[in-house]
Amino acid sequence: MNGKKLFRATGEQRMLCGVCGGIADYFGIDPTVVRLGWAILTCFGGAGVWAYIAAAIIIPEEVQ
């Protein structure tokens, strides 16, 4: 393994709970792309809302 861990973001990348910023940091992509994906999921049946809530509960917050 490469030693990377998935955490919710803190600081500038955080907007609501830090889920999108943490996922973007883990995969090395722009957080805006991840946020756009969540928005698209939300528009199609509301699955994005439930997935975001679940991720906010499951993914631990980054320890500084």
Image: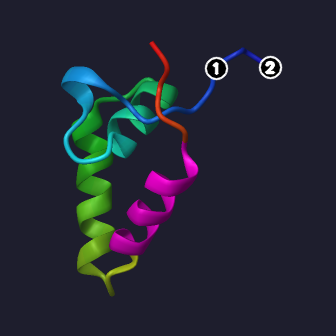
The residues colored magenta run: 48-59
Dot 1 falls on a residue whose secondary structure is: loop
- Image point (19%, 41%), residue name: 15
| Residue 63 place in picture, x, y as percent | 49, 19
Residue found at the very far bottom of the displayed protein: 45
| Residue 32 place in picture, x, y as percent | 21, 39
The span from disc 2 to disc 1 (Cα, nearest Å) is: 8 Å
| Residue 22 place in picture, x, y as percent | 42, 33
| Residue 51 place in picture, x, y as percent | 45, 67
Numbered mark located on residue 13 in the image: none
- Image point (43%, 36%), residue name: 8
Magenta-drawn stretch contains 53: yes
Q: Is residue 46 above or below residue 33?
A: below
Asked if the residue under mark 1 is in contact with the one under mark 2, i.e. CB atoms within 8 Å, the reply is yes
Q: Residue at label 1?
A: 4
Q: Is residue 58 left or right of residue 19?
A: right
- Image point (62%, 26%), residue name: 5
Mark 1 crowd level (few <14, some 14–19, many ≥20, 10 Å Cα): few
Which amino acid type corresponds to the residue marked 1 in the rendered image? Lys
Q: Is residue 18 left or right of residue 5?
A: left
Q: How is the image coloured?
A: rainbow
Q: What predominant SS class does the magenta segment belong to?
A: helix
Numbered mark located on residue 1 in the image: 2
Mark 2 crowd level (few <14, some 14–19, many ≥20, 10 Å Cα): few
Q: Is residue 54 left or right of residue 24?
A: right
Q: In this view, does 8 lie to the left or right of 5?
A: left
Magenta-drawn stretch contains 13: no
Dot 2 falls on a residue whose secondary structure is: loop
